[in-house]
Structures are given as structure tokens and as C-alpha cells.
């Protein structure tokens, strides 16, 4: 499995720059340590190698281990790509970097609850320091991605190359084992609040707005008392700067950008519930805002009614009174899957297949025992926006764990063959570029044996 082992490291290393936005690999206040290598104007520290090793082991679930020298060579290749992206005048717009930084900050804020906790957890002085470091990291990410894409843009594989690649693995008894995979489809029925409940929420927000505007009540205090937003006790409803690129839903941003400074919106609806928004300040393209969110309640009676309706649909499916596709078209209320036969797309791969053992444990428990064509029990689910719903899952197809087969697994083998060819192209490019690039190895790594001539020995 040596060939696939090397490819595993390659795939991790080429995506590792993206993972740096998790901050585990790029926290600012690490102790000053030794310089492992300088490539062009880019530095790799000893601690970078340790963090890379931890990330590889984490992402491979402990199945892949490499020496410090192997890790260093992969990091050097990344720095070489970044260096020559600058040499080749690869451009990166500020808007693109700002957008990536905003997405990273939103991710961390969701994980930790407040941005203040994120700043403290990773040892930054304030939000501006955090943004500055994320901007640096994300700019390097884009440079590496674009230079890599430029180097490999003309690389492709023919069917004959795929066959030869497969035969080589087979002859070396190095065929990969593909895990059990499933294709799933779903029917979703949402348990909606009544019109009376929606009106109650709107009236409550309208009264809160009146008390703030006419009686001088504190927006922050009203948010802490009334808002259903997670973390409101810490942030008082303050969301910080919002731009048109910030990953808030469209309806929310439309209201934010319609307000003047100091203005409070009328109540409005999004997928999360009903809001009112206060615009504090306009800072260039950004709007500093706070909001109060109230989520309408769904009655137990409505939940029961929704569940019974979906159980009736399941009975009709089992009895052959309706096809699954027609049931999806007629009844399902999930926008993402209603028009594709209910096909449940894996959000991590954008493919309709799911590796069974890598599923969310709750979903795994519901489908693990199903055979092709069987249905799950009707079950309750609640989304991150606190929408309440009942779901039914169909096992469309199931493939058990097996050794790679050229016919059954052609697309996967083609992807492996293409990845290998791209890796070889990058390695060839690296060997050529090393000769014209400043490289200085730290003393601790001069004894390493590298695939490329990083030591520039004759």
C-alpha cells in the first residue's frame, strides 16, 4: 500500500492549507522555535512539522504515519508553490481574502459561541490581530491553490492510462479496498407553527421595538431577555460587522442593508424565525448590527399530526400504492431534494454516495441495517435553524466493502489515476523550480533523504 500511502499524504498536504483556517495550525502566539527550512521568502518552523504530523494522523484516523523528513518535504513543496505563485504574478483580490476570513470567523464563532472566546482560545490580542493572521494564511492558501492548478491544468488521463494504473496496482497486490457505501433518498415533512403562533411572535417583536424606540428601553437587555439566539447572554444580540459577502441568509442581509444608522427594522421572517435588527454603524461596506430572534413554537399536536402523515405515506409506499419519486414530488418539503427524487447528497463530497462508516452516528444508526429498497422508520429531526420535521429514508443502493474493481469502480480508479499523474507533474515541476529557488535547510534536517534535490547536491 506504499503508493496509496504516499498519495494519502499528498491529498492531505494539498488540502492542509485550507485546514489552517481551523487555526490549530496557525495560531499566533506559539513559542518561538527553530527554523526547519527557508524556501524563497517562506519559512517552515519545527512546530509546523509537528502540527502537520498531528493533522495527518487526525485526518487519517491514525492509519497514516510519516517521518519528520517526509512531512518537511511536503511542506517545502507547498512553500515552493506559494513562492512561484508570487514570481508568476498570480493575483489575489482583497475581496476574496476578506470573504474567506469572514467564513472562517463565522465557523469559529459557531464552534465557541462568541468571537471573544475565539480570540482568547487562540492567543490573539483582539479581533483585528486574528483577522490579520487569517488574511495572511488565506492569501497563501489561494496562491498555492492557483499555482497548483496552473501547473496541472492540462493534466488528464486516458482510459488506457486508467487500465494500466489499475493493472499496476493489481499486479503489485496493492489494490485499494473501498469501504461500504450507500445511496440514500429522503422524504421530509415539516411541522410548522400555526398562523396564530406566527402572529403572536410578530406582535411581541413589534411591542419590543416600540419599547426601545418610544420608551428608551435597551436593545441589548431586550435581546438577552427575549431572544432565542444561542449565545445571546454573552453577546446581547450583537452580530458584529456584516458585509454582502458574509454568510448570512439573503433575507437577513437585504434588511440589514436597507437600514440607516440607528434604525430598527420591522419584524421580518427568515428560515431561523422572526427578527428585528438594529443597525449601529455603517463602516464602509460593513454594517455593525444587533438582532433579536424569536422562534415560533410548534405544538405537540402538530408534531403528532406530521408524524402520522409521514407514516401513512410510508405505508402507501410499502403497499405499492405510490412510487417514491411521486411521493417526494407530492409531499416532501425539503427544497434541496424535492426536485431530484429525494436524493440525499453528501455535503462533504457533493456526491450521492456516503461512506457508511464516516456517516454522522445518528444517521448511521438509522440506515446501517437497511438493504437496497428498504425504508427507515419515520424519525424526528431538528435543523440548526431549529426547524422541526419528520423524515423517512430510502436505501436506494448499497455496496459492501470490497477490493477495487475496474468495472464497478471505474470512476474512483480514474480519480486515483488522475491524482497520481497530477502528483507526478507537481514533483517534476518542483525538481525544475528548486534549482532556481533559494532553499536553506536547518541543521537538524540536513541528514534527511528527500525525493527532490532540496539540498542542491551534485
Image (spheres, rainbow, N blue to C red):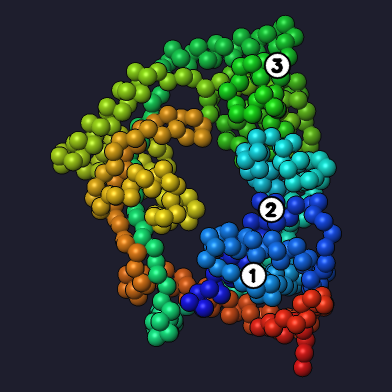
Q: Percent position (x, y) of residue 22?
A: 66, 51
Q: Is residue 29 above or below residue 120?
A: below
Q: Which mark is residue 221?
A: 3
Q: Residue at x 66, y 19 (%)?
A: 224
229 sits to left or right of 124: left
In the picture of the structure, the residue carrying the numbered disc 2 is 24
Q: Percent position (x, y) of residue 195?
A: 42, 15
Q: Nearer the viewer, mark 2 or mark 1?
A: 2
Q: Nearer the viewer, mark 3 or mark 2?
A: 2
Q: Earlier in the sequence, mark 3 or mark 2?
A: 2
How far apart are the alpha carbons under marks 2 and 1?
24 Å
Q: Percent position (x, y) of residue 324?
A: 25, 43
Whether residue 346 can be seen here? yes
Q: Is residue 451 above or below residue 93?
A: below
Q: Nearer the viewer, mark 1 or mark 3?
A: 3
Q: Earlier in the sequence, mark 2 or mark 1?
A: 2
Element marked by disc 1:
helix
How far apart are the alpha carbons under marks 3 and 2?
35 Å
Element marked by disc 2:
loop
Q: Residue at x 51, y 35 (%)?
A: 384
Q: Quadrant of the C terminus?
A: bottom right
In the picture of the structure, the residue carrying the numbered disc 1 is 148
To which quarter of the image does residue 285 belong? top right
Whether residue 95 can be seen here? no
258 sits to left or right of 396: right
Amino acid at each position: 500500500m506504499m503508493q496509496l500511502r504516499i498519495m494519502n499524504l499528498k491529498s492531505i498536504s494539498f488540502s492542509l492549507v485550507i485546514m489552517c483556517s481551523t487555526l490549530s495550525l496557525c495560531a499566533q502566539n506559539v513559542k518561538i522555535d527553530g527554523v526547519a527550512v527557508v524556501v524563497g521568502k517562506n519559512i517552515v518552523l519545527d512546530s509546523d512539522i509537528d502540527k502537520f504530523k498531528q493533522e495527518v494522523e487526525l485526518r487519517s484516523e491514525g492509519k497514516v504515519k510519516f517521518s519528520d523528513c517526509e512531512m518537511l518535504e511536503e511542506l517545502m513543496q507547498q512553500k515552493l508553490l506559494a513562492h512561484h505563485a508570487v514570481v508568476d504574478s498570480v493575483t489575489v483580490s482583497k475581496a476574496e481574502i476578506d470573504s474567506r476570513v469572514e467564513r472562517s470567523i463565522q465557523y469559529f464563532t459557531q464552534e465557541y459561541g462568541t468571537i471573544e472566546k475565539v480570540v482568547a482560545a487562540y492567543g490573539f490580542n483582539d479581533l483585528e490581530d486574528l483577522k490579520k493572521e487569517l488574511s495572511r494564511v488565506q492569501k497563501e492558501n489561494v496562491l498555492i491553490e492557483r499555482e497548483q492548478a496552473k501547473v496541472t491544468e492540462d493534466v488528464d488521463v486516458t482510459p488506457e492510462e486508467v487500465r494500466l494504473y489499475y493493472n499496476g496496482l493489481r499486479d503489485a497486490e496493492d489494490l485499494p479496498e473501498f469501504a461500504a457505501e450507500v445511496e440514500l433518498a429522503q422524504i421530509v415533512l415539516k411541522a410548522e407553527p400555526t398562523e396564530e403562533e406566527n402572529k403572536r411572535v410578530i406582535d411581541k417583536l413589534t411591542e419590543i421595538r416600540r419599547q426601545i424606540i418610544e420608551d428608551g428601553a435597551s436593545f441589548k437587555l431586550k435581546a438577552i431577555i427575549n431572544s432565542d439566539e444561542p449565545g445571546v447572554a454573552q453577546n446581547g444580540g450583537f452580530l458584529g460587522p456584516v458585509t454582502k459577502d458574509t454568510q448570512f441568509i439573503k433575507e437577513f442581509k437585504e434588511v440589514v442593508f436597507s437600514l440607516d444608522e440607528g434604525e430598527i427594522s420591522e419584524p421580518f421572517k427568515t428560515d431561523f424565525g422572526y427578527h428585528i435588527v438594529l443597525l449601529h454603524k455603517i463602516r464602509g461596506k460593513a454594517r455593525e448590527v444587533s438582532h433579536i430572534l424569536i422562534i415560533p413554537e410548534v405544538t405537540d399536536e402538530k408534531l403528532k399530526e406530521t408524524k402520522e402523515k409521514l407514516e401513512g405515506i410510508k405505508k402507501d409506499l410499502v403497499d405499492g400504492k405510490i412510487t417514491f419519486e411521486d411521493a417526494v414530488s407530492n409531499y416532501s418539503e425539503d427544497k434541496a431534494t424535492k426536485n431530484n427524487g429525494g436524493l440525499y447528497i453528501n455535503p462533504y463530497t457533493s456526491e450521492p454516495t456516503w461512506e457508511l462508516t464516516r456517516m454522522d452516528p445518528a444517521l448511521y444508526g438509522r440506515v446501517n441495517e437497511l438493504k437496497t429498497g428498504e425504508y427507515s422508520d419515520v424519525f424526528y429531526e431538528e435543523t440548526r435553524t431549529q426547524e422541526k420535521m419528520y423524515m423517512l429514508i430510502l436505501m436506494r443502493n448499497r455496496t459492501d466493502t470490497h477490493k477495487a474493481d475496474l468495472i464497478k469502480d471505474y470512476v474512483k480508479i480514474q480519480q486515483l489515476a488522475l491524482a497520481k499523474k497530477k502528483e507526478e507533474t507537481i514533483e517534476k515541476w518542483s525538481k525544475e523550480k528548486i534549482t532556481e529557488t533559494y532553499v536553506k535547510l536547518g541543521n537538524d534536517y540536513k541528514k534527511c533523504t528527500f525525493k527532490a534535490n532540496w539540498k542542491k547536491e551534485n
